[in-house]
Every structure is written in C-alpha cells, then in structure tokens.
Amino acid sequence: SSAANDISAASALLSETKNSVLTKENEISKDAQKMEKASAAATEAEREYERLTTEYQNMCAGISSEDSDEGMTLPDQISKAHNDANDADARAKQAKMKIAHLTKTMKSVEKDMKKEEKSSTQLATKKEKTTERVESIRSKMSQIDFSESEFSALETEKIDLENSVSNLEEKVDTLTAQLQGRLAFNYSD
C-alpha cells in the first residue's frame, strides 16, 4: 500500500509538474511576443532616427527633404514661397473684385425687385377695383328686366322700319324731283 501511495503521490507530482510546464510555456510564448513587438519598435525607432538625422543634415546644408520640394535649395524654396504668396494675393484681389461686383449686382437686383413689387401691388389694386366694377355691373345687369326674345323682336322691327323709311325716302325724292320738273319752266319773250 505504501507503493500505491508513492505511485499516487508521484502521479500527482507528475500532473502538477505538467501543469507548471504548460504555464511556463505560455509565459515564455507571451514573453516572446513581447520581445518581437519590442524588437519591431526598436527597428522602427532606428529608421526614424536615420530619417531625422538625414533631414537635419539636409537642413544644415540648405536642402529641403520634404516630398513636394525635394532637392530644392533654400533660395529656391524662398523663391517658390514668394511666387505662391503672389499667386495667393492675386486670387484674393480677384475674389474681392468679384465680391464687389456681386454686391453691386445684388443691390441693382434688389432695387429692380422693389420696383416690380410696387408695380405688382399697383396692378393688384387695379385688378381688385376692376373686379369690383365688373361685379357691380353684373349685379346691375341681373336686376335689369331683359328678355332675349323681346330684344330680337325689337331688332327685327327696327330693321323693317329702317327699310320702310328708306323706301319712303326714295319715293319722296322721286316725287320731289317730279314736282320740281313741273314747276321748272323757262320764261322766254
């Protein structure tokens, strides 16, 4: 039974040792990852140091190391900056002129708009008055006792009477001419 206890203790110790080994392997793996990250950061820091050193040396020599002005000397950079400033100044003047022109145009348009609004108001007033007059006339017309058939009959009668007058005038003219013909005599000795 002592051997069974020894085997059991040895088995427990073996199991505990396996667990300790697994734990240590995990810790070693994590430490290896940390070392890889630290190594990559150190490599990146060395590259940045080299870049900054080169940039510092170029600045001391009067050469720009920026991408857009690569290889330009300090006088060339100053000349470029001067030209850029002149371009910016010209664009600013153009913008000011455009603003002044648009402001002037806007004032003119506002003035025209006010005239048109006044004209529109006057036309609206005239329309309102005219509408009132039309309604007044319609109201008066509706109060008039008007019959279309009576009007047609009167119109026909008027035409007949005008024709009769015309015929009578012709007869009067004929009779007048005949009477004058009888009365007209020549006196001779």
Image (tube, rainbow, N blue to C red):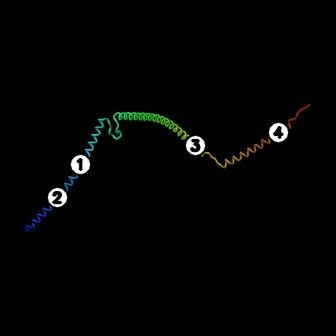
As helix, strand or loop, the secondary structure at mark 3 comes to helix
Q: CA distance from mark 3 to mark 4?
A: 54 Å
Q: Nearer the viewer, residue 85 or 110?
A: 85
Q: Residue at x 17, y 58 (%)?
A: 21
Quarter of the N terminus within the rendering: bottom left
Q: Circle 1 sits in a helix, a strand or a loop, which is it? A: helix
Q: Label 2 vs label 3: CA separation?
A: 111 Å
Q: Which residue position is annotated with label 3?
A: 134
- State the quadrant of the C terminus: top right
Query: For this view, does 182 lie left or right of residue 151?
Result: right
| Sequence-earlier tag: 3 or 4 | 3
Which labelled disc corresponds to residue 177? Answer: 4
Q: How far apart are the alpha carbons under marks 1 and 2?
A: 26 Å
Residue furthest out toward the right: 189
In terms of sequence position, does the residue under pointer 4 or pointer 2 come before the other? Answer: 2
Disc with the residue nearer the chain's start (1 vs 3): 1
Say the numbered circle drawn on residue 39.
1
**Tag 2 secondary structure:** helix
Asked whether the residues under the numbered discs 2 and 3 touch, taking CB atoms below 8 Å apart as contact, a structural biologist would say no
* Residue designated by label 2: 21
Q: Kindly identify the amino acid type of the residue bearing the numbered disc 4.
A: Ala
Whole-number angstrom distance, CA of label 1 to CA of label 3: 99 Å
**Label 4 packing within 10 angstroms: few (<14), some (14-19), many (20+):** few
Give the mark, 2 or 3, whose residue is nearer the N terminus: 2
Say which label, 4 or 1, has the lower sequence index.
1
